[in-house]
């Protein structure tokens, strides 16, 4: 008997709703591709008339959205971890990844 890996018939079956969604997406993509030059011209005309939403849409599509910075902090802007917690965490990770610990885990099957 085979365990693991890709097996015939394994995994979640594709439902009817998923198939319908895929058909709808394919249809919409086909229609948009057909009318892309006209869609672009409308967006460009709106942009030239000062429509900021159209401008943003064109720039996002042409150059990608600008990267957004994500800042993680605790309450009132304080660091999530203090220096002591960081040191303990680093030591625990180093210990876990150490060669000796790896051998022990292999022996116990962890």
Image (cartoon, grey):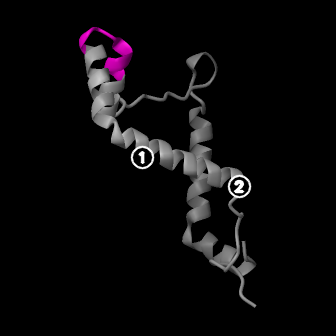
Residue 102 locus on image (x, y percent): 61, 72
Viewer-proximal residue, 103 or 11? 11
Element type at mark 1: helix
Residue 103 locus on image (x, y percent): 63, 77
- Queried whether the magenta region covers residue 55, the answer comes back as yes
Residue at image location 66% in from the left, 79% down from the top: 7
Residue of label 2:
16
Up the image or down, 14 lies above or below 28; here it is: below
In the picture, the disc for residue 58 is: none
Q: Is residue 62 left or right of residue 22?
A: left
Which quadrant would the C terminus be assigned to in this image? Answer: bottom right
Q: Answer few, some or many: residues within 10 Å of disc 2's Cα (few below 14, many 20 plus, some between 14 and 19).
A: few
Residue of label 1:
30
Mark 2 and mark 1: span between their CA atoms?
Answer: 21 Å
Viewer-proximal residue, 91 or 69? 69
* Badge 2 or badge 1: first in the primary sequence: 2
The kind of secondary structure the magenta stretch mainly shows is helix
Q: Which residues are magenta?
A: 48-56
Q: Is residue 108 left or right of residue 45?
A: right
Residue at image location 67% in from the left, 80% down from the top: 8
- Queried whether the magenta region covers residue 87, the answer comes back as no
Viewer-proximal residue, 89 or 9? 9
Q: Residue furthest left?
A: 48
Element type at mark 2: helix
Whether residue 63 is visible to the viewer of this picture, yes or no, is no
Residue at image location 34% in from the left, 36% down from the top: 35
Residue 106 locus on image (x, y percent): 67, 78
Do the CB atoms of the residues marked 2 and 1 lie less than 8 Å apart? Answer: no
């Amino acid at each position: 008997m085979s365990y693991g890996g890709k097996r015939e018939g394994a995994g979640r079956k594709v439902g009817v709703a998923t198939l319908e969604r895929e058909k709808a997406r394919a249809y919409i993509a086909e229609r948009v591709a057909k009318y892309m030059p006209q869609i672009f011209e409308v967006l460009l005309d709106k942009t030239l008339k000062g429509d900021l939403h159209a401008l943003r849409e064109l720039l996002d599509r042409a150059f990608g959205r600008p990267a957004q910075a994500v800042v993680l902090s605790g309450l009132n802007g304080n660091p999530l971890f203090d220096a002591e917690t960081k040191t303990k965490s680093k030591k625990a990770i180093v210990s876990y990844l150490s060669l000796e610990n790896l051998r022990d885990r292999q022996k116990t099957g962890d």
